[in-house]
Amino acid sequence: MNDVDHQAQSVALFRYGLIGDLVQLKPGSAGLYARIREKAAAEHTIPGTTRTRVAAETIRDWLKRYRRGGFDALLPRRRADRGRPRAIPAPVAELLCSLKEQKPALSVRLLIREARATGQVPPELPLPPSTVHRLFAGAGLMAKQPDQPSHQDRRRFAFAEAGELWTSDVMHGPAVIVGERVRRKSYLIAFLDDATRVVPYCAFALAENTQAFLPVFKQALIRRGLPARLYVDNGANFRSHHLALVCAKLGVALIHARPYQPQGKGKLERWFRTVRAQLLPSLTSADTASLEALNRRLWAWTEGEYHHCPHRGLEGETPLERWAQSAAHVRYLEPGLDLDALFLFEVKRRVQKDRTVSLNGVVYEVDAALVGETVTLRFDPHAPPGRPVQVVHGERPMPPAKPLDAYANCFVKRNRPSHTLETDTPPPEPPRSRLALRDLNRRTHEHGADNDNSGGHNHEERG
């Protein structure tokens, strides 16, 4: 994805983040315009500009456009100054904010120095400390450190209906055996419905990145429908561009917790404590023999014990009982929705002169008409290597990319420059051993000698 497309999506995501909690309200609902005025009176960090306010009329216009055309309707129209450099490009701003979150004690100048040391900042791009400071302040990264006293008003909250709010986070899990004897640390990725304490889905993974998080999120959606809001932490996996796009296209408001304020995820942290106290001590060596065995044990405990246990926070009811009482308004996936396609990852690749591209160490072959062009590859990172990959050029889908078969290409005609390369006869099976190759050469030589001899006899007979 080039910088222009990324900037446009960042603007659309900001607009959706501003109206995400209003999308579920019907037009003309009581209190709708009051909430719009509150958003207009607040300050925001707007991508691509130093402005911090958005007019109420603009917010209403964005809400109407989203209801008519979905997420794509929020993409900004082509600017007259498109292609000109901004003060701080979005990728550089994300890098700076990520470094600030990792090392909050460093000064602004030291963070700028570390950002340039990564090689991801163009050398000619100026980064004035005052501009970077405003970027951090707008992102809420210049707040007080956690050891300083805070008098913020915090109150216990609980939603009334199932699906109004899901909370998600990651817990460090036990070591599992991967392969034959290698033991690796696992991470428990979980979702919790705030109103019912039901766990839509949870699973152990070998990483806590976006590629590990999205499949768990996908299974939660299939099992328990679409939440109105998803409340997550500020980790890199939750700040990913792909997660924001998925939530925006599904109509889910993605909410990030403020830095150094984990109190909003107290219910999920309490569930993690239950996992540590009840599940982890009962694990056997057979349960940790593989990641699949560990997840089977986890889900058996969740569905067989936790969901059927009376909960003190639910006035003695079980999570499943509370879900049955309050799940009437849960939005379930549309029958025609291609959820697999929605969760596909995307990368940009330039097609080489031999019509190949590389993805995760595998060389793929694309249409010959795409040589020299930049294409978008859409793929499932968890699919077995070697499967065909979707190819998009501009906005147009192209024939899928297939793993390169260099031996088969020896028998393909190359007199056609475009879409379909055909061959008259299928390629022969390649020799499987040196002995077979020697036998093939011997039979070819004898066949050639026979032809020479037969030719000589015919010549003598004609003579």
Image: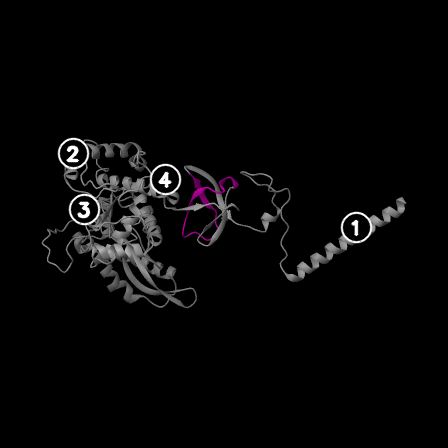
Q: Indicate yes or no whether the magenta region holds residue 17.
A: no
* First in sequence: mark 1 vs mark 3: 3
Q: Are marks 2 and 4 in contact (CB under 8 Å)?
A: no
Residue at the spot of label 4: 337
Q: Are marks 1 and 2 in contact (CB under 8 Å)?
A: no
Q: From this viewpoint, is residue 238 visible?
A: no
Mark 3 lies on a secondary structure that is loop
* First in sequence: mark 2 vs mark 4: 2
- Measured as percent of width and height from the top left, residue 25 is found at 21, 36
Q: Nearer the viewer, residue 170 or 303?
A: 170
Residue at the spot of label 1: 451
Is 320 left, or right, of 386 in this rendering?
A: left
Disc 1 to disc 3, C-alpha distance: 89 Å
- Mark 1 or 2: in front is 1
Is 276 left, or right, of 348 in this rendering?
A: left
Q: How is the image coloured?
A: one colour
Mark 1 lies on a secondary structure that is helix
Residue at the spot of label 3: 159
Q: Nearer the viewer, residue 442 or 284?
A: 442
- Mark 3 or 2: in front is 2
* First in sequence: mark 4 vs mark 1: 4
The amino acid at mark 1 is Asn
Packing grade of label 3 (10 A; few <14, some 14-19, many >=20) is few
Q: Indicate yes or no whether the magenta region holds residue 379.
A: yes
Disc 2 to disc 4, C-alpha distance: 32 Å
The amino acid at mark 2 is Tyr
